[in-house]
Image (cartoon, helix red, strand yellow):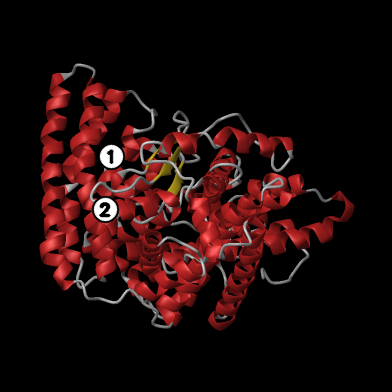
Amino acid sequence: MRIAFVVLLLALTSCSSYNQPAVTPESGFSDFVDNYFKASFEYSPTFATASGYHAYDNKLDDLSAASVSKRITRLKEFEKQLAGFSVLKGDEAIDAEFLASQISAELYELETLQTWKKNPMGYVSLAGSAVDGLMKRNFAPAKDRLNAVTTRLALIPATFVSLRENISNPPKEFTDLAIRMAQGSAGFFEKEVAAWAVSAAEGDQTALASFNTANAKVVSEIKNTANWLKTDLKPLSKGSYAIGAEAFSKKLLYEEMVDIPLAKLLVIGQENLDKDYRDFVEIAHKVNNLKTPAAVMASLSDDHPSAERLIPATRQTLAGIRKFLVDHKIITLPNENMPLVQETPPYARNGSFASMDSPGAFENRAEESFYYVTPPEKEWDSKHVEEHLRLYNRPVMDLITIHEAFPGHFTQFLYSKQFPGKTRKLLSASSNSEGWAHYSEQMMIEDGFSGSDPKRKLAQLSEALLRDCRYVAGIKMHTEGMTVEQAAKLFVEKGFQEKANAYEEARRGAYNPTYLYYTLGKLQIYKLRQDYQRTKGPEYSLLSFHDEFIKIGPLPLKLVRKILLPLDRSPTL
């Protein structure tokens, strides 16, 4: 979810143009890459901060229509320059292909899909993410970071001006989530941000007074925006979230370099859903053959933490899973670091249940990674709270930690500084990053993590069914007219999700069309592993495959195959 939201913000933001020398093949591909990311950082200073480039900490993303137009112009210039490199080899050739695909994806998002005109969520979330990125990581003295926070606070009101100017007739699902995020953000600035500023000021009353003035204005603007979203925009939110078959295929091609025809893609997803469903029913009968599969899953979910115990219970899963990883030689861990478990910040509560927020590969001082888990909202009734918490039952919580931490996203972060070149350190394909994390769940169970307890296998299959339902729902919601309510029914009936959680999952598909990349990536990685094992023969080991795979960086699987299997021309699936 973190990666998906960074992509959304990049698609919504822009910057002023600046003078720079033209890049030619003679001046070198590395110069082109440097210029491309310099423009990206000017375009999105919050992306720069998250990546570990702190020269941009006093700036904020410009979300105006004029800035979007300038961004489109810059991207087309880079696209033309990149096409001039015809003799690249090795890693540079791979990275050039990846960059070309990513530039096409961003241009398609800005020019054709125009999400920046339809989705208020990116505007609402920017304020919190821009400030939180400066607060939570100790990359500079606290007073310096406080000054940067104050500077960004002064720039935030312009974001809400752009929101009102740009957004027209959004889907109601987008507006509803934006309202939730805005309401939570107001409390975030009033409480967490204000409390941090008192500590960061270290007695400097002048600095604190400047912060308080700027923060009070932001709180007022957020509250006004929340009211505007509810009273003005929501009644006008009658747009369609469906992007259509052509756009769906192009997004997948540009973002993930997947060119499988849509009809075949849906067949693959449906067959995988049916297979996992049959396996789930079989394992459920082993757990308790006197109950229906749904009742067995419900009994598993009975063992869940309270809202107060959610964070401590999540934290307790880390050490044991890490130890299993080491003992079973699943993958080499570069160090002993562990993530910090915290509640998902209010500004980021867009329907996700858990996520990993790690520092960028170019962050040299701050090492804090945050394993976020989303608590129930205060305004929910007791039934909704209970259904939400049931997702975090013990067996499933282990699988979530595998996905988010070991050997999933946190482990990817541990390797990020080793990724070859700037491009792979700063960009990623979701089918790789999320595909790897989802692959890790099944792989760990297959390698013995479940032991003799079928409940963990059942939990793994429930997580697989969740992603399978995303796969099928995403395609059908955007290309076949499936409604959010119909998609939620699919999550309940085939994914064994609680009704409240099923609706959250289905609604996510409205703004994240290609969230099939979990299952799609997992299937691609399994095929890659099979082909890799056949090529290596007796020299193959699971450890060596995982080590080689993760060191390459989060490229689309099509490009990973070119590196690991240079003589193999078979498809990714």
- Residue placed under numbered mark 2 in the picture: 381
Give residue 545's position: percent from left, percent from top: 74, 50
Image quadrant in which the N terminus is located = bottom left
Q: Is 204 placed left or right of 283 in the picture?
A: left
Amino acid type of the residue tagged 1 in the rendering: Val
Q: Residue furthest right?
A: 538
| Percent x, y of residue 153 | 19, 40
The kind of secondary structure element at disc 1 is helix
Q: Residue at x 52, y 63 (%)?
A: 294
Camera-nearest label, 2 or 1: 2
Residue 517 seen in render: no
N-terminal of the pair, mark 2 or mark 1, is: 1
Q: Secondary structure at mark 2?
A: loop
* Classed neighbour count for the residue bearing mark 2: other residues with Cα under 10 Å, few (<14), some (14–19), many (≥20): few
Say left or right for 540 vs 8. Answer: right
Q: Of residues 121 and 24, which is closer to you in this image?
A: 121
Residue drawn where x is 71% and y is 52% of the image: 446
- Residue 406: x %, y % from top left: 59, 42
**Which residue is nearer to you in this view: 442 or 573?**
442
Q: Residue at x 24, y 69 (%)?
A: 172
Residue under the point 38% across and 44% down: 48
Label annotation for residue 131: 1
The answer to which image quadrant residue 241 occupies is bottom left
- Dividing the picture into quadrants, the one containing residue 474 is bottom left
**Left or right of 187: which side holds 14?**
right
Residue 536 seen by the camera: yes
Which percent across, then down, holds residue 505? 41, 62
Q: Quadrant of the C terminus?
A: bottom right
Amino acid bearing label 2 = Asp
